[in-house]
Image: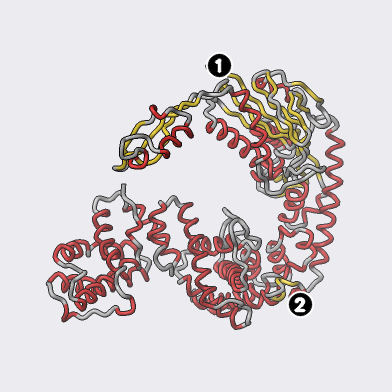
């Protein structure tokens, strides 16, 4: 079958850098999926993007769909033929619907039932006639934010300026918002011009001649090489933040790195202030010496060639100078404000109309933090540090520096607290209580910071759930999922053996005392426990725990997060053990039949036991219950499971000899009660019947 290359380029007004890579990947996947669904074979697929274009080049696309022969199932045989053996109206209608003659119908058995079938042959169409459907793929793309322009109904990331859609040398006719497809692309906004793409295979080189490097990987590698060259020539170190590199890469079509400098006096500012000013606001790479100390230089990447770099550097220096001058002014002014005055200003900042001010939130954080420190059995000095850190946790929000650079909240709190003479542990905790700030961020290093962090996050979760602000679908405006995940991460990283439901109850009680709950206390607790289970599930998935092991553990009550994780990882280790399946089957026999017990009448009367197997299993249960309870309290899941495993033979002997569902009602209830009590011990570890064996 003959083949051709296919090219699609969507020319746009400049997209936000953070949208570019995901949009490129989305377009590529959608087209690949569409070709596959359309039965069009294709070869290597290349994805390209710049701030002004999304493109896909697919090699060796078949010129024709593959033919398709499929079997369609119709009505059952008893419906398809009448008593005389003739085709029924249902069968004749089925034949017409499939475009076949009644004589072509045949019968085939499916799960013990005969059905009428028809073989349907569909001849493949020419690919060139299918490709105009690409229009719907383009229109169907989704973005974090969309635009509408002119009177068009289409919502897209940015207005479409040109379209290149070619199958071999042929242009595929598509029109979107009055933009017709062709083979004309546009080069760099200032250095390039409009060009004709002669063939899909010449696309990359043709754009390169117009100062556009369409391959994002090639562009990124070029930036890395240029940074390394500057490092080598100047004797500097340029720490490369990968997120910043990705953003810069999606801001340029033809990168050229250059450097500039700033006055050394600005090095007196905290390192984080300088880096934030350069990285977050100007997209500059900071420069350090071999010891990691900041130098008064920066590196930026220009969207263009190396002409007049001196002028470009001077312009960037002027912009950065203004930013750093502002930062220096804010830093000096903030130090004139007393911490007590800053705390007073928090009373005037609304946290939420139903939850009061930031000052109110700080008081709740102090309440939670004190209780957490007590539960964790901190020393008296640590408890004092926790309380002071909680009290000062938000004071830097009213500083000019944080107002101008919100990314520095916490960091400036630590800086200003040290300047004000606060204990180093307290100052550090002010910064750490925001950690982890994002997925993959580290947990607080100090116990003081960890306790205040949990207190802050618990308050956000409890108050939001308490007034009905519960995340739905993808909507989570208060980042509650991230807050919950942060608490789980801290507890696991710290190895704290705290009972998690106890922490929730402490926070809920504190919020209830302030009359902030608009929902029943029990409902809030139940909703939060379920919410945290989903976050624990995510944590276990990230640790490559299988879905059925996760279900087995999370179906039980979660008191300690560390124990839940240990259980799940232990089950994963046991899946390939020879005796594990036998043990699971025995334990599951108990939990399955225990569902028939009346939970309101769980009473065991030993005098009603009729067989030695009942007596022995009951004796074994009493011994195992003590071991499992003690082992789980100590976090020893291996010992707990070993105790449950010891019941396997006794359980099997019991079911070999005993009929639980006796005709005698008293005997049946007694046996079901015995099963229910034993089941409760088993499910305190996991619901083993969730585990799937091949």
* Local secondary structure at mark 1: loop
Frontmost residue, 348 versus 320: 348
The answer to whether 70 appears left or right of 475 in the picture is left
Up-down relation of residue 587 to residue 7 (above or below): below
Frontmost residue, 172 versus 206: 172
* Local secondary structure at mark 2: helix
First in sequence, mark 1 or 2: give its number. Answer: 1
Q: Residue furthest top?
A: 2
Kindly identify which residue carries mark 1.
Answer: 2
Is residue 238 in view?
Answer: no
Q: Nearer the viewer, mark 1 or mark 2?
A: 1
Residue 458, position in %: x, y?
58, 70
In the picture, residue 195 is in which quadrant? top right
In the picture, residue 623 is in which quadrant? bottom left
Q: Residue 475 carries which label?
A: none
Colour style of the rendered protein structure: secondary structure
Residue at x-position 48% and y-position 70%: 500
- Mark 1 Cα shell of 10 Å, populated few (<14), some (14-19), many (≥20): few
Q: Residue furthest front?
A: 84
Residue 166, position in %: x, y?
68, 23
Kindly identify which residue carries mark 2.
Answer: 344
């Amino acid at each position: 079958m003959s083949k051709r290359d296919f090219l699609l380029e969507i020319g746009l007004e400049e997209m936000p850098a953070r949208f570019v890579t995901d949009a490129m990947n989305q377009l590529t996947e959608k087209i690949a999926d569409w070709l596959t669904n359309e039965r069009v074979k294709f070869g290597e697929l290349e994805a390209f993007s710049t701030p002004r274009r999304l493109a896909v080049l697919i090699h060796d696309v078949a010129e024709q769909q593959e033919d398709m022969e499929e079997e369609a199932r119709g009505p059952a045989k008893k419906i398809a033929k009448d008593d005389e053996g003739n085709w029924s109206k249902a069968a004749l209608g089925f034949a017409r619907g499939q475009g076949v003659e009644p004589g072509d119908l045949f019968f085939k058995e499916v799960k013990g039932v005969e059905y009428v079938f028809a073989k349907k042959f569909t001849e493949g169409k020419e690919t060139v006639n299918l490709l105009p459907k690409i229009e719907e793929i383009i229109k169907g793309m989704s973005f974090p934010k969309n635009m509408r322009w002119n009177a068009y109904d289409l919502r897209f990331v940015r207005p479409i300026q040109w379209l290149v859609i070619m199958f071999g040398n042929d242009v595929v006719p598509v029109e979107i918002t009055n933009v017709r497809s062709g083979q004309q692309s546009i080069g760099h906004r200032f250095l390039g011009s409009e060009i004709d793409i002669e063939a899909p295979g010449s696309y990359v080189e043709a754009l390169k001649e117009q100062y556009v490097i369409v391959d994002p990987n090639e562009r990124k590698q070029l930036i890395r090489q240029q940074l390394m060259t500057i490092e080598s020539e100047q004797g500097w170190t340029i720490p490369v933040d990968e997120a910043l590199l990705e953003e810069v890469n999606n801001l340029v079509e033809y990168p050229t790195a250059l450097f500039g400098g700033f006055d050394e006096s600005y090095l007196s500012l905290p390192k984080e202030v300088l880096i934030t000013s350069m990285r977050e606001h100007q997209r500059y790479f900071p420069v350090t010496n071999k010891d990691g100390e900041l130098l008064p230089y920066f590196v930026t990447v220009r969207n263009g060639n190396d002409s007049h770099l001196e002028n470009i550097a001077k312009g960037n220096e002027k912009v950065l100078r203004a930013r750093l001058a502002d930062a220096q002014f804010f830093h000096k002014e903030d130090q004139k404000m007393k911490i007590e005055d800053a705390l007073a200003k928090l009373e005037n900042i609304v946290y939420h109309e139903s939850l009061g001010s930031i000052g109110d939130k700080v008081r709740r954080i102090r309440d939670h933090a004190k209780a957490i420190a007590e539960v964790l059995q901190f020393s008296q000095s640590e408890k004092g540090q926790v309380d002071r850190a909680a009290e000062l946790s938000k004071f830097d929000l009213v500083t000019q520096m944080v107002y101008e650079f919100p990314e520095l909240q916490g960091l400036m709190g630590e800086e200003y607290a040290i300047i004000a003479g606060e204990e180093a542990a307290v100052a550090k905790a002010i910064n750490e209580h925001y950690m982890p700030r994002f997925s993959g961020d580290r947990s607080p290093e100090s116990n003081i910071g960890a306790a205040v962090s949990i207190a802050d996050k618990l308050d956000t979760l409890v108050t939001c759930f308490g007034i009905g602000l519960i995340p739905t679908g993808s909507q989570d405006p208060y980042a509650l999922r991230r807050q919950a995940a942060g608490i789980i991460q801290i507890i696991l990283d710290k190895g704290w053996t705290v009972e998690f439901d106890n922490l929730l109850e402490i926070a809920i009680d504190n919020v209830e005392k302030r009359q902030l709950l608009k929902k029943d206390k029990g409902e809030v607790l139940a909703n939060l426990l379920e919410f945290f289970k989903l976050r624990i599930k995510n944590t276990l998935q990230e640790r490559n725990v299988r879905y059925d092991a996760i279900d087995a553990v999370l179906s039980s009550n979660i008191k300690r997060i560390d124990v839940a994780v240990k259980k799940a990882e232990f089950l994963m280790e046991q899946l390939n053990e020879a005796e594990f399946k036998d043990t699971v089957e025995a334990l599951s026999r108990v939990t399955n039949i225990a569902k028939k017990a009346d939970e309101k009448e769980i009473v065991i009367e030993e005098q009603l036991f009729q067989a030695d197997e009942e007596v022995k299993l009951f004796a074994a249960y009493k011994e195992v219950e003590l071991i499992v309870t003690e082992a789980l309290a100590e976090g020893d899941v291996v010992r707990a499971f070993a105790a449950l495993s010891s019941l396997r033979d006794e359980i099997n002997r019991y079911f070999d000899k005993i009929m639980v569902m006796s005709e005698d009602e008293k005997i049946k209830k007694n046996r079901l009660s015995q099963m229910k009590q034993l089941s409760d011990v088993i499910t305190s570890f996991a619901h083993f019947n969730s585990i799937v064996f091949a």
